[in-house]
Image (cartoon, grey):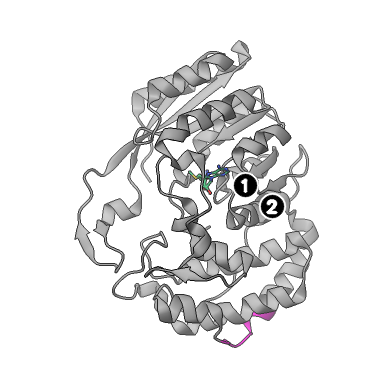
Amino acid sequence: MIKYLGSKRTLVPRLCELITALEARSVIDLFSGTSRVGHALKRVGIQVHANDHNAYAATLARCYVQADRDELLADASRLIAEFNRLPGAPGYFTATFCEQSRFFQPHNGARVDAIREEIAAKALPPELEAVLLVALMEAADRVDSTTGVQMAFLKQWAARSHNQLELRLPDLLPRAAMGKGSAHQLDALAAVGVLEADLAYLDPPYNQHKYLGNYHIWETLVLWDKPESYGTACKRVDCRSRGSAFNSRPESAAAMRAVIAGVQARHLVVSFSNEGFIARAEMEAMLRDRGEVLVLAHDFKRYVGAQIGVFNLRGEKVGTAGHLRNTEYIYVVSDSPAALDRLRPLAAAADALATASP
Ligand SMILES: C[S@@+](CC[C@H](N)C(=O)[O-])C[C@H]1O[C@@H](n2cnc3c(N)ncnc32)[C@H](O)[C@@H]1O
């Protein structure tokens, strides 16, 4: 899967444990990002409805949550083999992300251009197209020259950027026992009005850094609209106009309150960092309207960028991060006291051990 800030890679086993203990048969993943949470839940048989407002994330969800392996495996494998044989043909991607900026080496940029044009030319059914776009996104991610965000590229080429781009089949899963999953590209505030499940998992952004700005290249690769760009990082111009209430200090608490009040699910599981806009006491107060709240605390190393240091937009190191660990809280609220009782031993263990390091 792609490198992604705030991805719940190390929390996935704990989230699966909690969600299965609550006996949820269907789950809304309202801020799905890489879809690794939805993917893990689908693997244990749960029906997942994934949502994210960015197109690249909705594409990841269509591949990992909605698409079912048995229906797509043969076509996807054949097309991946075909695309891996395509010679490079430099175009928009190479000019923008290898020449005007230096996110990828030109030999890999030319392969991205060739493969992306071929995907467009084939006008594939949406799920098959999503699988191929994810294969291409992940292949490009393996040869990029960043610290994991696309605000800046490294001054010196990353060692991996010299490798040859190669598509691999994404880890498609068979249809979940509880039913087919779905992928949606809506603002969370609108999605709560249309999606319904036993449980909702909420993992909103914590701060002002927009995911669109951090992953603008994936948005451009998926939309293939060849937009005007600006700045050293060649961001798409709509990074300036597309926003999220969850990235705004004055708006985030009201947006979170609206989502918590409106989401159509009996159980809620919320991930939020101690470094975010909403403090633990405020989050607990918001959730209490829906029932008793349990909180599990997990101590983490901060994201890789913070480990490496602080960089300016030219990719030069200009400082070190203030601290290297943060606490991730998992809040659980349910209208069923019996369901919460099943979680109490897990909550006690998590708080006592302050577990998990990436
Ligand atoms: C912390 S990340 C989720 C990470 C995800 N759980 C994972 O493990 O990969 C937050 C996600 O919320 C999405 N997002 C931000 N504002 C949103 C909004 N208003 N509606 C829907 N999605 C939003 C971002 O695009 C981002 O992918």
Front-lying residue, 133 or 263: 263
Q: Which residue is mark 2?
A: 173
Q: Residues within 10 Å of mark 1 (few under 14, many from 20)?
A: many
Quarter-wise, where is residue 302 in the image?
top left
The magenta stretch spans residue 250: no
Residue 18 placement (x, y as % from top left): 55, 28
The segment highlighted magenta reads: 82-89
Q: 96 or 19: nearer the eye?
A: 96
Asked if residue 107 is positioned above or below residue 14 in the image, the reply reads below
Determine whether 106 is above or below 334 in the image. below
Q: Which residue is mark 1?
A: 39
Identify the mark nearer the N-term, 2 or 1: 1
Give the side of residue 358 with respect to residue 77, left or right: left
Dot 1 amino acid type: His
Q: Is residue 344 above or below residue 65?
A: above
Magenta stretch contains residue 84: yes
Q: Are marks 2 and 1 in contact (CB under 8 Å)?
A: yes
Horizontal and vertical percent for residue 121? 73, 77
Q: Nearer the viewer, mark 2 or mark 1?
A: 1
